[in-house]
Image (cartoon, rainbow, N blue to C red):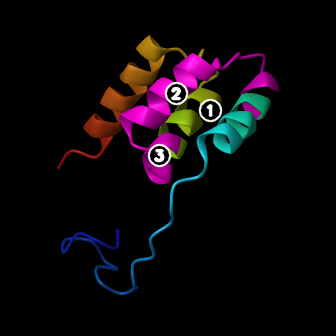
């Protein structure tokens, strides 16, 4: 919305960069929330997601949100499917 010249708010704000959330803290947060809907997030699956995006918060949060919202088990196969879905949704 803010970064594409074809969008209404293009360049209307200044970009702000957030550093990566430490992996252990992020895992604990995500696992706790997924546990509330009876979905087990293993450290291995979280490491896969975190490392795939080099700790970039927007991508990680987007994928976790899709898994949570759809009550999908957070494993590497489903993570890859949510990545594919996100790419498709953002294709022009």
Q: In this view, does 18 lie to the left or right of 83?
A: right
Counting from the top left corner in percent of width and height, residue 40 is at 70, 16
Marks 3/2: CA–CA distance: 9 Å
Q: Residue 69 carries which label?
A: 1
Q: In the rendered structure, does residue 79 fall within the stretch colored magenta?
A: no
In the image, 46 versus 59, the foreground residue is 46
Marks 2/1: CA–CA distance: 20 Å
Instruction: Report the residue at 42% width, 27% height from top.
Output: 82
In the image, 53 versus 61, the foreground residue is 53
Q: Is mark 1 on a helix, strand or loop?
A: helix
Q: Which of marks 2 and 1 is nearer the N terminus?
A: 2
Please name which of the two marks, 2 or 1, marks the residue nearer to the observer.
2
Q: Mark 3 packing: few (<14 Cα in 10 Å), some, or many (20+)?
A: some
Q: Mark 2 packing: few (<14 Cα in 10 Å), some, or many (20+)?
A: some
Counting from the top left corner in percent of width and height, residue 19 is at 50, 62
From the image, give the main secondary structure of the stretch colored magenta.
helix
Counting from the top left corner in percent of width and height, residue 12 is at 36, 87
Q: Name the residue under label 2.
A: 47
Q: Which of marks 3 and 1 is nearer the N terminus?
A: 3
Q: Mark 3 points at which residue?
A: 55
Q: Which of marks 3 and 2 is nearer the N terminus?
A: 2
Quarter holding the N terminus is: bottom left
In the image, 87 versus 31, the foreground residue is 31
Tags 2 and 1 touching, CB below 8 Å: no
Magenta residues, start to end: 33-60
């Amino acid at each position: 919305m803010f970064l594409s010249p074809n969008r209404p708010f293009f360049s209307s704000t200044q970009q702000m960069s957030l550093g990566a959330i430490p992996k252990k803290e992020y895992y604990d947060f995500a696992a706790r929330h997924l546990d509330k809907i009876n979905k087990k997030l293993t450290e291995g699956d979280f490491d896969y997601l975190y490392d795939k995006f080099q700790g970039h918060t927007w991508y990680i949060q987007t994928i976790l949100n899709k898994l949570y919202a759809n009550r999908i088990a957070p494993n590497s196969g489903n993570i890859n499917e949510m990545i594919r879905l996100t790419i498709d949704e953002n294709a022009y």
